[in-house]
Amino acid sequence: MVQKKDLVGADKAEGKRRGRPRAYAPDVAIGQALSLFRRTGYAATSLDDLSAATGMNRPSLYGAFGDKRALYIKSYHRYRDDYTAGAVDIFNADIDIRERLTRFLTLALDIHMTGEAGPSGCFTVMTVASDAIADPEIRALVREGFKDIDDAFVWCFRTAIARGELPDTIDVTVRAQMASAMIYLSAVRSRAGMPRAEIEATLVGAVEQLCQA
């Protein structure tokens, strides 16, 4: 026979279970926030939207990540870290300049074409640079991101010169910035819904021009 005290104890235990904060994985939550920010931008994303996307209530969001701005910056760092991780093999590969540029631009296009509701483009180009650039810290992160891309391409062209694939008379800075510009073009056209095959054809043509002696 169940005693009243047992029922009371069960009710208390159940109340504790109901009141317990939902468990979450920070990396997963940041990834979910990143997807939302890429889709809707900074200003149009509310805390309620972030709560729904991550499954965390507002107090949990604040406790784990701080305010919306802080979570936005964490999401941007996550985006850049993912991009960098994808590029490591390209840096380490023993390949010529044409193949290296092709792989870099293809990696970028793969990222630009992802999105739950269609291609999201580049988070830096399509969202951060246009939606939150007024914030000094975010502006500095964007400029740092652009410089990182330029520096990666500078390394590609200097490596090609060292390997004898290109003459040392080329302006590596200009070519690097031209290669970076193709990433930005890829981002905008992807977000606009242009067919992947059409964007790829443009990138192939750009690689041929960039690899001219």
Image (spheres, rainbow, N blue to C red):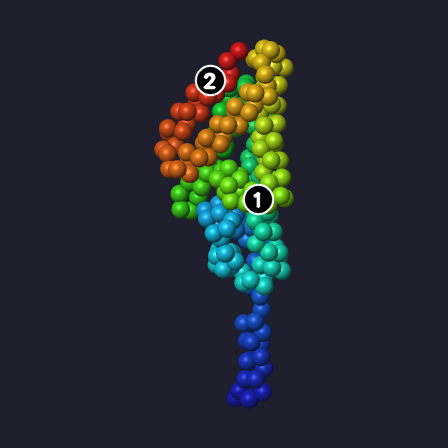
201 on left or right of 149: left
For the point 60% across and 59% down, which residue is it?
62
Q: Is residue 93 visible?
A: no
Q: CA distance from mark 2 to mark 1?
A: 37 Å
On screen, 16 above or below 136?
below
* Residue 170 image point, x, y percent: 58, 13
In the rendering, at what x and y percent does residue 207 appear? 48, 20
> Height in image: 23 above or below 161?
below
- Measured as percent of width and height from the top left, residue 74 is found at 60, 48
Which mark's residue is nearer the viewer, 2 or 1?
Answer: 1
110 or 194: nearer the viewer: 194
Q: Secondary structure at mark 1?
A: loop
Task: Answer with mark 2 or mark 1, whichever residue precedes in sequence.
Answer: 1
Disc ID at residue 1: none
Residue carrying label 1: 134
- Which residue is found at the position 36% from the left and 33% from the top? 195
**Front one among 173 and 119:** 173
Dot 1 crowding, Cα within 10 Å, few <14, some 14–19, many 20+: few
Vertically, is 144 above or below 137? above
**Which residue is found at the position 49% from the left and 47% from the top?**
41
How many residues crowd mark 2 within 10 Å: few (<14), some (14–19), many (20+)?
Answer: few
Q: Secondary structure at mark 2?
A: helix
- State which quadrant residue 146 falls in: top right
Q: Which residue is mark 2?
A: 208
Residue shown at the point (50%, 18%) measured from the top left: 210
Q: Amino acid at mark 2?
A: Glu
Q: Nearer the viewer, residue 118 or 70?
A: 70
Contact between marks 2 and 1 (CB within 8 A): the answer is: no
Amino acid found under the numbered disc labelled 1: Ala
